[in-house]
Every structure is written in structure tokens, then in C-alpha cells.
């Protein structure tokens, strides 16, 4: 007589055991395709982290995975400092060419600065003695300079006026300080009208005789000290 099979209510049914194997296979396939997708990015940091995670899952990890932290790299914006610096160099060369074409190399000096360029106007192209009115030569060269820089409306322009130490007393100016300030204002007004640069980005200051380039001990040195300095900043803080 055949033995009667005893059923165990807590034991899994035999016909459903294959589902566990099938589920494991699907999970492994999914993991495999995720790995392929991650490797397609060729990111060494992600690849290393993935490798260490797999080693941990399979019991091969010898140490905790290390997450590499990289500083955030900002994408340069349009009009970056490097772009502005290149533009200032090109404009400075154009101004030098204009000065050379007018044979004013001795009276007009152009130098490169960290933020743009500096232009110095000396006698005799600047102002008559004791006057804050620009000479025609000075107006002409400033108009030419304006033509070069006017395509940069966001520039910051600072004008400094300087004199020698010869005392001045006139009905209009009580000191060299007032004279130098008035001269720098004359240049600001001309550049503002010619370039269209916002007046909020322009400033004028007078130093009188207090920042000489050379000791005021000779007519030649005094001539050097009588000057207007124009600082054109392409790179703004």
C-alpha cells in the first residue's frame, strides 16, 4: 500500500521555488546593465565608487569606500576678466597707434595696468598755464581715444589732475588743488560726451602738486609734473 504524503503547511510549495532563482537572475541582469551605463560615462570617480560598492556587495571590500570631493568649477561667463583683459590690450595698442600717427609720443604716454590701461597727457597738449580749458590738441587726442574705448559702455574711468609746485592765485583758482580738480573735470566731461560711458562710472580728482613724478627743482621736472592721468578700467571689482 502506497504511503500517503504528509503536507507541511509552513513549507513553500515546490512549484514556486523557481521564482526565487528567476528574481535573482533579473536583479543581476539589472545590476549588469546599470554597470554598463555607468561605465559609458567614463567618469573615473564614479567607476571607482561603483567598483568598491560591488566589492562590498560580494564581500570583497577591505576598507570603506572613499568619496572624492572636488571643488566646484565655475563656467566662465561671457565677458569674463580674461576676455576683458584681451580687449584692453587691443585697445591700448590702438591708442598707441593713434598717438604715433599724430607724433605725440613725447606728450601722450600709454601704459598697461592690471585692470586696463593708463593714459598720461603732458604739456604742451593739455592746458595753458593757469587754465582749466583744454587746448585743441588735447581735445583732438581725447576724441580719438574716445573713439577707441566707446564700444565698452561698462568701463570705469578715473581722471587725476596734477600740477607743479608753483603757487597760483587768480580770480578763478585759489590754489593748485583747485586748478588740478578743474582740469580733471574738464577731461571727464569731454570723455563722457564723446564715449557715452555712464557718468556713474566716471570720476575726477585733483592732487595739486602733492603727487609729483619728479622733484620740482627744474623747469623740465615741473613740466613732467603738470599732467593729466586717465585710468581706464576694463576689469571692475
Image: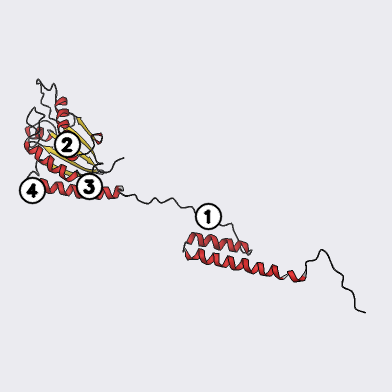
Distance (Cα) linking label 1 and label 4: 62 Å
Q: Which residue is mark 3?
A: 88
Q: Quadrant of the N terminus?
A: bottom right
Q: Earlier in the sequence, mark 4 or mark 2?
A: 4
Q: Position of residue 54 (x, y in %)?
A: 59, 63
Give x and y (percent) for residue 230.
18, 38
Q: Is residue 131 left or right of residue 156?
A: left
Q: CA distance from mark 2 to mark 3?
A: 21 Å
Left or right of 46 on screen, residue 214:
left
Please tell me in which quadrant of the rendered image residue 115 appears. top left
Label whose residue precedes the other's in the sequence (1 or 4): 1
For disc 2, the marked residue is 193
Residue 68 appearing in the image: yes
Q: Distance of mark 1 from mark 2, alpha carbons?
A: 58 Å
Characterize the local packing of mark 3: few (<14), some (14-19) or many (20 or more) Cα atoms within 10 angstroms.
many
Q: Can you give x and y, in whole percent of width and height, for residue 149 in the image?
A: 19, 44
Mark 1 lies on a secondary structure that is loop
Amino acid at each position: 500500500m502506497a504511503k500517503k504524503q504528509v503536507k507541511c503547511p509552513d513549507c513553500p510549495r515546490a512549484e514556486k521555488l523557481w521564482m526565487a532563482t528567476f528574481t535573482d537572475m533579473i536583479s543581476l541582469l539589472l545590476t549588469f546593465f546599470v554597470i554598463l551605463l555607468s561605465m559609458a560615462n567614463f567618469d573615473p570617480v564614479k567607476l571607482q565608487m561603483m567598483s568598491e560598492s560591488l566589492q562590498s556587495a560580494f564581500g570583497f571590500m577591505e576598507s570603506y569606500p572613499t568619496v572624492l570631493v572636488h571643488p566646484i568649477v565655475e563656467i566662465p561667463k561671457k565677458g569674463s576678466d580674461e576676455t576683458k583683459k584681451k580687449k584692453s590690450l587691443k585697445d591700448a595698442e590702438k591708442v598707441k597707434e593713434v598717438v604715433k600717427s599724430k607724433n605725440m609720443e613725447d606728450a601722450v604716454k600709454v601704459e598697461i595696468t592690471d585692470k586696463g590701461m593708463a593714459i598720461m597727457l603732458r604739456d604742451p597738449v593739455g592746458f595753458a598755464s593757469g587754465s582749466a580749458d583744454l587746448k585743441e590738441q588735447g581735445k583732438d587726442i581725447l576724441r580719438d581715444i574716445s573713439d577707441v574705448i566707446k564700444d565698452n559702455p561698462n568701463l570705469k574711468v578715473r581722471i587725476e589732475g596734477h600740477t607743479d609746485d608753483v603757487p597760483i592765485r587768480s580770480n578763478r583758482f585759489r590754489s593748485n588743488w583747485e586748478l588740478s580738480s578743474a582740469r580733471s573735470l574738464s577731461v571727464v566731461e569731454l570723455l563722457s560726451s564723446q564715449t557715452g560711458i555712464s557718468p556713474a562710472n566716471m570720476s575726477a580728482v585733483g592732487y595739486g602738486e602733492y603727487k609729483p613724478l619728479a622733484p620740482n627743482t627744474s623747469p623740465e621736472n615741473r613740466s613732467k609734473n603738470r599732467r593729466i592721468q586717465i585710468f581706464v578700467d576694463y576689469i571692475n571689482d
